[in-house]
Image (tube, helix red, strand yellow):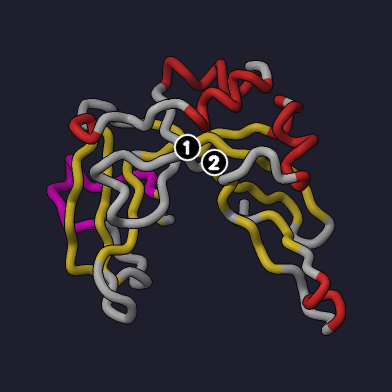
Amino acid sequence: MPWGFPRHTREKRLHGAPPGRIELVADLTNPMWEYLVVDPRYRCLTPITHFANPEGVPGHKTRAWFSVTGEPLIAWPGFCRNTSEFGPVFAGMTMTANELVRPFNDRPVLLQESEWERWLHGTIEDVIEFQFREPMPSEQLSILHTGDRWQSGIPPCAPSSRRPKTMLIL
């Protein structure tokens, strides 16, 4: 399933250009998400072992991989639906980053397995609470700095026991 809901702008319509993509849900009050947020059938989970963020100066960014210590699998909550422009798509929900992630870039909401059911079938209040809760403490995350170029598509060089099996690149 491709990442990113269609984003129609007046400028793109005027020039006959295809819509752009919105990949992250940072503001649940945006009218675009209005009906998706309240309806559990549009919620999804992306199971991950690690997520990556860019590190360094523009043009020379490398990948920094994050994982949750002691949790072999976590999930990134988001929204999905079928669109006429791109077919099935999804976007992930973001929140305030903790001290470890903040210097890098994006900040995905991370759910442990015990929270998955609540995300998928909970109330709108549950959804809002997940986005506006305190971020996971920095000490619960591990970081692996790599020399791999940000756009390279290379997973982190780590022993096979630590190599991501399901990765998310933000």
9 above or below 140? below
Q: Is mark 1 on a helix, strand or loop?
A: strand
Q: What element carries label 2?
A: strand
Kindly identify the amino acid type of the residue bearing the numbered disc 1. Trp
- Marks 2 and 1 sit apart, C-alpha to C-alpha, by 7 Å
Instruction: Tell me if label 2 and label 1 are in contact, CB under 8 Å.
Output: yes
* 8 vs 30, nearest the viewer: 30
Instruction: Report the predominant secondary structure element of the magenta stretch.
Output: loop
94 above or below 22? above
Residue 87 lies in quadrant: bottom right
Question: Residue 9: horizontal and vertical position, in percent?
Answer: 78, 68
- Graded by Cα atoms within 10 Å as few (under 14), some (14 to 19) or many (20 or more), the crowding at tag 2 reads many
Question: Residue 110: horizontal and vertical position, in percent?
Answer: 42, 33
Residue indicated by mark 1: 76
Question: Residue 41: horizontal and vertical position, in percent?
Answer: 73, 28
In the rendered structure, the answer to whether residue 80 lies left or right of residue 106 reads right
Marker disc for residue 108? none
Question: Residue 68: horizontal and vertical position, in percent?
Answer: 27, 34
In the rendered structure, the answer to whether residue 129 lies left or right of residue 38 reads left
Q: Which of marks 2 and 1 is nearer the N terminus?
A: 1
- Graded by Cα atoms within 10 Å as few (under 14), some (14 to 19) or many (20 or more), the crowding at tag 1 reads many
Kindly identify the amino acid type of the residue bearing the numbered disc 2. Met
Q: Is residue 57 magenta?
A: no
Q: Nearer the viewer, mark 2 or mark 1?
A: 2
Residue at the image position 41 percent from the left and 55 percent from the top: 169
Residue at the image position 71 percent from the left and 45 percent from the top: 30
What span is in magenta?
A: 156-167
Residue 18 lies in quadrant: bottom right
Residue indicated by mark 2: 93
Residue at the image position 85 percent from the left and 75 percent from the top: 13
Residue found farthest to the left: 159
Residue 37 lies in quadrant: top right
